[in-house]
Image (cartoon, rainbow, N blue to C red):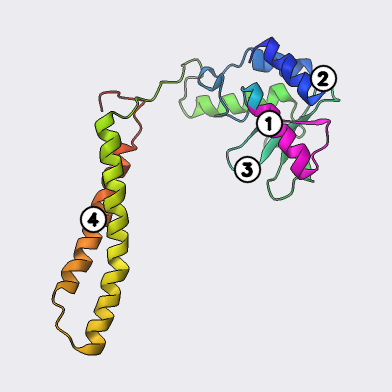
Amino acid sequence: MTRDELLRLEGVLEVALPPEYVQLVLELPVARERGTTDGPLWDVAEKLIAHNLHLRRECDWPAHMFCIGEDGGGNQFAIDVRETDPCVFEVEFEDFGTHFPVSYPDLPAPLNLARWFAVYIEDLERDGIDISAPAVPQMPLTKLEMIAGRVLIGIFVIGILLLPVSGLLALVRRLTGWSMAYVPALAKTGIVMFAASGGLMMWLGRDRSRNPAA
């Protein structure tokens, strides 16, 4: 975020952001998370504005609590803008009325904003992630791949529908004694269509960032 974006955020939400927070987002150390909401510290002013306004309207979120991001599972991370050296609070998605300082087994709570983000960086580096590396853009699907994807979705749906239909016909066959020799083949066809189209759709949706030629 830029200073102008932060000023807009402060104006819309009518808060004064702590200097520690401003400095952290202006110099966000994790390059691939700049300008995104991919990490626990969101770096998109409009998303932060919209999300905090939503929390205030729908969840009785107090105005002095500023949501800075999420953990990816619905839990919110927030700071109290009244504090000069704010600690980070975690708010569970089931109970927005309860918040507690973030803590770790080997670190006493509460963690201030700088220490909290430092722990996050340590975890990334422990996982072998280069925080200075920018995000690698995903290669877009070609027109042919998009058409193939639509066709596969159709085959996938047909395969799913064939399974209960074949099951129903098998029941009718058993009750009536009719031959209906095609029923086993129909069931096998549904299974093959379901499995093959599902696998191909997973291949089309593969990670295209590491090897654009893949």
Magenta stretch: give its range.
Answer: 47-67
User: Is 59 contained in the magenta span?
Assistant: yes
x and y percentages locating residue 198 in the rendered image: 30, 49
Q: Which residue is mark 2?
A: 16
CB atoms of marks 2 and 4 within 8 Å: no
Per the image, is 27 magenta?
A: no
* Quadrant of the image occupied by residue 108: top right
Q: Residues within 10 Å of mark 3 (few under 14, many from 20)?
A: few
Q: Identify residue type, mark 3.
A: Gly
The residue under label 1 is 50
- Label 2 element class: loop
In the image, what residue occupies the spot 45% across and 26% down? 128
Q: Residues within 10 Å of mark 1 (few under 14, many from 20)?
A: few
* Outermost residue, right side: 82
The answer for how far apart the CA atoms under marks 3 and 1 are is 16 Å
* Drawn side of residue 197 relative to residue 116, left or right: left
Q: Which residue is mark 4?
A: 193
